Image (tube, grey):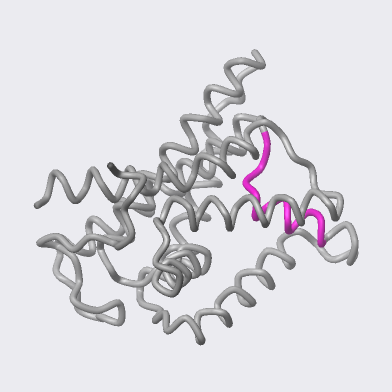
Amino acid sequence: MFLKIKNIPKVSWSSDKPLNLKPKISTFFFLCFGLTLFGLGEGLLIVSLSGASPWSVLAQGISIKSGFSVGLITFIISASVLIFWIPLNQKPGIGTILNALIVAIMIDICIKYFPSPENYLSQILLGAIAVLIVGLGGGIYLIANLGAGPRDGLMVGLQIKTNLPIAAVRATLEITVVCIGWYLGGTVGVGTLIFAFGIGPCVALGLFLVNKFFN
């Protein structure tokens, strides 16, 4: 059962180590493909107008209290999360850098070219599809093992330390973050809740499917 997955699977195109500056072409391809899907899902969630992701809610809440821009707060949060990598023994790689670049580009593309649904139910449906895409993309790029993004690295590190299922660790992180963000004044929508409760199982599903088809 994919909800019980506790480790990032290794397949034929997985890198032996995160800090690999000369990965195989197949490894680099799946890294970029996974991150493209990840960014597409993040962008579609914004376009859906059903609610921002939990970490965006946190950034919004801190922005309201501090007076700094959401963009600046998002950067500070990412940098702060990387600090937690140290005691968790997580190592960055080219995927850590490409995460920020590709996801940002895909979000801009979605905002520019994808219209927002006018019907409320369609907005919720698109939000749910977006979360599924984020999870599948996350599973693919994590298996490439070329370095996770700040939040995914935190998830992997905590999973290793606690030995809990990845779905449970990710869901706990997202729910905690969204609760803090909401308390600070961030805006929570149905899409936010779908993301908070659904991203863990969706990432686990992505890991399961890639492992099943490539092993």
Give residue 46's quadrant in the image. Answer: top right
Indicate the position of residue 151 as horizontal and vertical percent values: 52, 64
Assess whether residue 151 is covered by the magenta stretch. no
| Number of marks in picture | 0
In this rendering, the answer to whether 107 lies above or below 58 is above
Task: Find the magenta span and give its range.
Answer: 51-62
Left or right, 132 with respect to 5, comes to right
Q: Is residue 16 above or below residue 45?
A: below
Q: Main secondary structure of the magenta part?
A: helix
- Where is residue 98 drawn, in percent x and y? 41, 66
In the rendered image, the quadrant that contains the N terminus is top left
Please tell me whether residue 179 is drawn above or below residue 133 in the rendered image: below
Q: Is residue 210 left or right of residue 214?
A: right
The residue under the point 47% across, 41% down is: 41
- Which of the 4 quarters of the picture holds residue 118? top right
- Nearer to me, 160 or 105: 160
Name the residue at 58% across, 58% down. 173
As rendered, which of 182 and 14 lies closer to the eye? 182
Location of residue 73 by image quarter: bottom right
Locate residue 72, reporting x and y percent.
Answer: 73, 67
Residue 183 x/y as whole percent: 84, 52
| Residue 56 is inside the magenta segment | yes
Left or right, 93 with reference to 72: left
Residue occupying the point 56% across, 31% down: 127
Q: Residue at x 41, y 39 (%)?
A: 133
